[in-house]
Image (cartoon, rainbow, N blue to C red):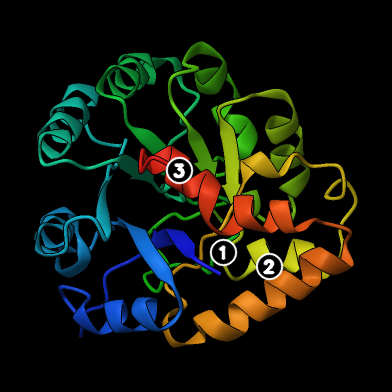
Amino acid sequence: MKKIDIHIHLQKDDPTLESYLAHMDAHEVEAALVHATSREEVGNEAVRKAVSAHPDRLYGSVYVDLRRPVYACIDLIKEYRAHGFKSIKLFPNLGYDPNDEQFEPFWQAVEDLGLMCLSHCGWLAPAPDKRERRSSLTATPFHFEIPARRHPGINFIFAHFGGGATYLETVTLLSRLKNCYADTCRGWGVWVWEQRMPGLKGLDFHHVLFGTDSIGAQYGEHEKWWTQTLLDMGRSEDDLKLYFYENNARLLGLGA
């Protein structure tokens, strides 16, 4: 089945994703959204170079650290939107609250620029440097509720299905707000479906997205597992097409 992956990252040993594209080609993955991180070797400029080398296959997502001054963040997303980037990538585990009123000009800029927002959500292993604060407290879907209500032009994607402990926040927002989505990346994004957690059966599958967090060579077995799991849960072939391809094509503006 043809697929689009809404959540991959650069690999340090594969800076332009040449090797990764071979895995995509082998498993009918037509395109992917590449999210930058805070590390320079896989950061915004590295992503820009990779996606510019593979137009129509790879699309860029600019990493933004909202601990920086708000207008510096706005300048950053304007710069990368001019390079054709489709999304922003947030990591609120670092301690900022995306719901804070100080970020309202930022969210207005995201909407005005026509960008999506994918945020890491949920539990994260402690930082190697114990002096660095990392927490799940502000990295949950409900911290995006007010921005999502105020800015219906922004499509919000909760990575890893919004986390294990807070997956019901994901279910609630996906059920109530048209501009909220979640991917099913490995970790909690797989666990909630593996455990058949309450609330999943009734979800509108227009809001559930195929994303892998760079599964690479495991695309084939990943597709088999998700296909069997979703069919076992009563999902239709049309739901599978939405999940694997059509939803992501629509969000990326690829004409499906």
Label 2 vs 1, first from the N-terminus: 1
Horizontal side, residue 196 vs residue 222: left or right = right
Check the image and report above or below for 214 versus 173.
Answer: below
The image shows residue 214 at horizontal and vertical percentages of: 42, 73
Which residue is rendered at x = 88% and y = 68% of the image? 232
Mark 2 in CB contact with mark 1 (< 8 angstroms): yes
> Of residues 122 and 242, which is closer to you in this image?
242
- The answer to whether one can see residue 95 in this image is no
Q: Earlier in the sequence, mark 2 or mark 3?
A: 2
Tag 3: Cα neighbours inside 10 Å, few (<14), some, or many (≥20)? few
Circle 3 residue: 256
Q: Is residue 206 visible?
A: yes
Q: Which residue is disc 2 drawn over?
A: 190
Q: Which residue is mark 1?
A: 185
Left or right of 218? Residue 131 is: left
Tag 2 secondary structure = helix
In the image, what residue type sits under mark 3? Answer: Ala
Among the two numbered marks 1 and 3 on one chain, the one whose residue lies closer to the N terminus:
1
- Name the image quarter holding the N terminus: bottom right
Q: CA distance from mark 1 to mark 3?
A: 22 Å
> How far is disc 2 from disc 3 in space, using C-alphas?
26 Å
Give the quarter of the figure containing the C terminus. top left
